[in-house]
Image (tube, helix red, strand yellow):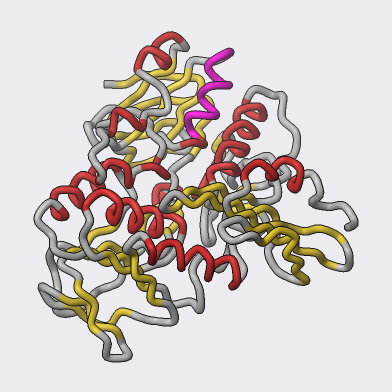
Amino acid sequence: MERSFDTVIIGGGIAGVQAASILCQEQKTAIITDEEYLPYYRMRIEEIISGRGPEELYMHPLSWYEERGIEIIHSRAESIDKEGRAVSLADGSVIHYSSLLLATGSNARIFPLSGRQDRIFTLRRATDAEAIGKALSSAKSFTVIGGGLLGLELASGVADHLHIPVSVIETAEYILPRQLDKPSASLLMEKLMEKGVSVITSASADHADDEYLYLKDGRKIPSSVICFSIGVNPGKEIAEKAGIKTNKGIIVDEYLRTSSSDIYAAGDAAELDGRLFGLAMHAREMGSAAAFYILGKGKPYIPSEPSALLKIGGIDVVSLGRIGGESDVITDDGDRRVTIFTDDGIVTGAILINDKASMARIKALIGSRR
């Protein structure tokens, strides 16, 4: 079967849905997703392990897409014919396009763990969460390898809802080194430990058996279920196969154009000026920017300063701008802490713990002189 659309989007993440919400106002638009579910908020999938259904995480109900004429195609995109402007799907159908947006996201990293083959997972898709939830239903302990955003939220959620021993193994000196400074990370680690999450830093996994994960320093951690949360690899395979230029990700210019005419990329898979992004805020921005350029209304994309807002074990953590340089703790009253970072007197970033009320005011300070 062959069908045609003005713009075809490969990927049902935030970048793809954001682009579709703009394109559909003027164009016939389709989203190709290789998942059985409607597009959902991937950063919340640990909630599935705690008992929520994937449908509860949907960005929009089916009626939202139907009202806007956005077609959701549930199949895997196998290849791109650049000259024929067509995408071949795993079910044998061919989808023709005038413009193509690659919002292919990213894939979870994992490394071999000798001595153990079963009950080892990654968490990137709703089906992963469902499988982890099933495994944990009879588990005596749980270990997350990686102390990043998703890994910590996963560990905290399991500790809160299943009440089994939970450990986090982090190779860095402290958790969330991209978002936090060491004092803020230490405060967060204390709160996690109070909730039953053991955080082990400066440590690396070596091997595992049915009951334990063994670290390279000889320690053994109870681990009847193990989940890797050690970052992602951009989903660039279909672009590489089509001869589109890639590096770490799919290379784009300031208009989110790839090396191939009428093909764009946005979100986790896109690489701009040698930089990958990986945050929901940038995926949303890129989706909008690519859509407006496809409609002939675009302007160069300038990424916003990064920010991360998360809730781990009931603790609100906000990371704004660039973390590093000179630091100044302006609030520290037990559970609430605010740290400002400056470079030559200019505010470059901030970390707020349990103080979301100050977020807008402090964010407005970034770029100004103290």
Q: Position of residue 83 (x, y in %)?
A: 48, 36
Look at the picture and state if 170 lies above or below 58. Answer: below
Please name whichever residue, 67 or 316, is drawn nearer the observer in this view of the structure: 316
* Start-end of magenta stretch: 16-26
Q: Quadrant of residue 216?
A: bottom left
- Residue 251 in view in this figure: no
Q: Residue at x 43, y 77 (%)?
A: 201
Q: Is residue 104 left or right of residue 123?
A: right
The residue at the far bottom in this view is: 218
Q: Position of residue 364 (x, y in %)?
A: 79, 44
Q: Quadrant of residue 198?
A: bottom left
Please name whichever residue, 170 or 246, is drawn nearer the observer in this view of the structure: 170
Q: Position of residue 317 (x, y in %)?
A: 55, 53
The residue at the far top in this view is: 67
Q: Residue at x 41, y 22 (%)?
A: 60
Q: Residue at x 28, y 34 (%)?
A: 54
Q: Residue at x 24, y 77 (%)?
A: 221
Which image quarter holds the C terminus? bottom right
Please name whichever residue, 333 or 214, is drawn nearer the observer in this view of the structure: 333
Q: Is residue 324 left or right of residue 30?
A: right
Name the magenta segment's main secondary structure. Answer: helix
Q: Position of residue 316 (x, y in %)?
A: 53, 49
Q: Is residue 336 left or right of residue 142?
A: right
- Residue 187 in view in this figure: yes
Which image quarter holds the N terminus? top left
Q: Is residue 179 magenta?
A: no
Look at the picture and state if 148 lies above or below 301. Answer: below
Please name whichever residue, 190 or 250, is drawn nearer the observer in this view of the structure: 190
